[in-house]
Amino acid sequence: MLLILAAELAFTARHESQTVDEAIHIYSGYRHWCGDYGVNPEHPPLAKLIATIPLLFDHPKNPGPPCGSDNSDKSGNFTEGRQFLYSNDARKILTETRSFIGLFPLLLAMLVFVAARRMFGGWAGLLAMLLVVFEPTIIGHGTLVTTDSAETCGYFAAVYAFYRYTQQPTNLHLIVAGVAAGLALAAKHSGILLLPALVLLAAADLWLHHREPRDEMSGRESKLKMQLVRQAVALAVIFIIAFATLWGFYRFRHAPRPRGYEMSESLSAFIQDGLQYRHARGLMLTRVIPLLAYVLPKSYVYGMADIAIDNSAGRTAYVFGRLYTTGKWFYFPAAFVVKATLGFLLLLLLTIPAAGYLWREKRRETLFLLIPAIFFLAVSMTSKLNFGIRHLLPIFPLLIVLAVGAACCLASRNRVWLCAIVLLAAFHCASSVRAFPYYLSYSNEAFGGPQQTYGYLLDTNSDWAQGLIDDRDYLARKHITDCWIDYYGPLDPDYYGVPCKVLALYPSKRAGALPLPFEGTLIVSVADFMGYAWGPPEMDPFGTLHHVQPVARLGGHSLVFQGHFELPVPSAESHAAMAQILAGEGRVEEALAEARAGVTLAPQAMDTHLSLAQILVQAKQLPSARTEYLESIRLAETQGEGYWWASIGVARQGLAQLNAPH
């Protein structure tokens, strides 16, 4: 089964172009090895360090500026990440880093086998491992250079290690639990949820001891007090080891960057900008995070502040065909129902008829699997950052082991249950195999499979810019060279051999701005097709195509159309983006003409006014620039700031700088 999982991961990775976040993770991981944690502090270093181990031996020909000297601005880091990846051998780097990050799902499969075997027996271990090996979400995110699979491993390992400690309270189990908790913290900031989950598990363990029969307990109150003290000490030791492990990944250094180098923006200024320009709020930002900066690595606290600002301000969420200005409580439960296989969901429902057995015979195991899963889900449901089932990945192994425990209980009762469980496990595997290699865009059969996922969920659930290789292969099969492509993500289609001219947000100088109208072949990213990155629904640039049958659907990430097209909003955005390119070359008058063309084509698009304002500043036309800044902010606030989360702070900051006394 491990060989099968390794093959799935390898073939899937080879089939996918770079996803949006991978370049910055790779670049920052490589910089972390020299001691610079100022790049991409949004994510802790564990996964990035593991993924970039091969680069220490490859010695990329373009390693970037001296360690600690580059910009630590978030948007700048993304640009530097792309430059680093594609100025070196991008294919080789992606292959190597994805291979190393792929160790985490393999480790997870082994951990699940060991845990299920210990809790429910040998057959349970094998069945649980089978479910992990064919779980599309685990495979889909298993080789991407992100933090999700590493956090899932750490979260599950810490829960299981603490379970073993409550069974056999040895020093070894205590140390393993502490180290595993530290790895979860060092993998992703949401790993911090593990700590209160462990407290809840300790309380559950005390409750289990309290319910033991009276005739087996003499001096009940004193024993409970001793147990309470023991659990408190155990948690304290685990937390100390966990935070020591976290500090270790930052080289036990408080400063984010090597001596002599500072962050581009201080932590207090970064928080203040979030409060002022993104209208973020909350005691977490104003009180808690500044205090944590005294006891935790500063880079880690920068990341906490970044997430807190985003979560407070909110981002757009797309679920069941509707775009919301901010996250919704039902997003993650809905995403789980869409993205989990029907076989797994039905196996999970078996916990209902098996509830009596689980509560009587396997109460500790049930609580240790349910509590951390429910707690993680409950906190996730309060989040305003709803852009992927990957953020819920840590609950998958916990629920898999619980479902398997219920299944094995029922299978032992009679042959009918055994046959039903075998069929459901086979259905789970078959659904996964049918989706190959489109695991990132997977949805179960009730929602149409990978090709239809975009009708229910977007962003990392369906289209994360992974489809350029698919696009290239389709065009080659059809011998199409004259085409336009709109894709979700600032990548370079030329690198992947896609011959199309790029429209919309990321035009190339070779293509120029999108003409209006145009004819031919058009490939559209499903995220953009559904209006995800374009502002409010009325700004959906491809709304006229929603009733047109595409000539092809590519891997659940792209749609292909042929015909006559008139798309004013993408044309406007491409004029605005071309204006930025020309302004960067010092061709200000040409840039102004392009920016004004964008505003004329889409006067309700906040981004077009923002682009014009920025170029007017460069042209020293400050009163006109102030007018455009004000209009861009007015549009964003009227339409919903969540739609323009990536731009609203830039607009407010630009206006403030313009109004500042010189």
Image (tube, rainbow, N blue to C red):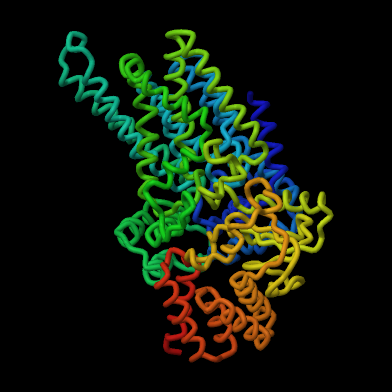
Q: Can the viewer see residue 457 in this picture?
A: yes
Position of 77 relative to 355 (above/below):
below
Q: Can the viewer see residue 28 in this picture?
A: no
**Horizontal relation, residue 642 to residue 217: left or right:** right
Q: Quadrant of the N terminus?
A: top right
Give the farthest residue toward the right. 479
Q: Quadrant of the C terminus?
A: bottom left
| Residue closer to the observer: 428 or 408 | 428
Question: Where is residue 195, by image quadrant?
Answer: top left
How many numbered marks, from 0 up?
Answer: 0
Residue 305 image point, x, y percent? 41, 58
| Residue closer to the observer: 182 or 559 | 559
Residue 420 image point, x, y percent? 50, 17
Residue 579 image point, x, y percent? 64, 79
Residue at 23%, 15% (x, y): give it: 212
Position of 35 relative to 158 (above/below):
below
Residue 254 image point, x, y percent? 45, 54
Question: Where is residue 53, by image quadrant?
Answer: top right
Residue at 61%, 76% (x, y): give it: 576
| Residue closer to the observer: 589 or 264 | 589
| Residue closer to the observer: 617 or 287 | 617
**Horizontal relation, residue 451 to residue 172: left or right:** right
Position of 368 relative to 446 (above/below):
above
Residue at 48%, 91% (x, y): give it: 623
Position of 136 relative to 588 (above/below):
above
Residue at 48%, 36% (x, y): give it: 154
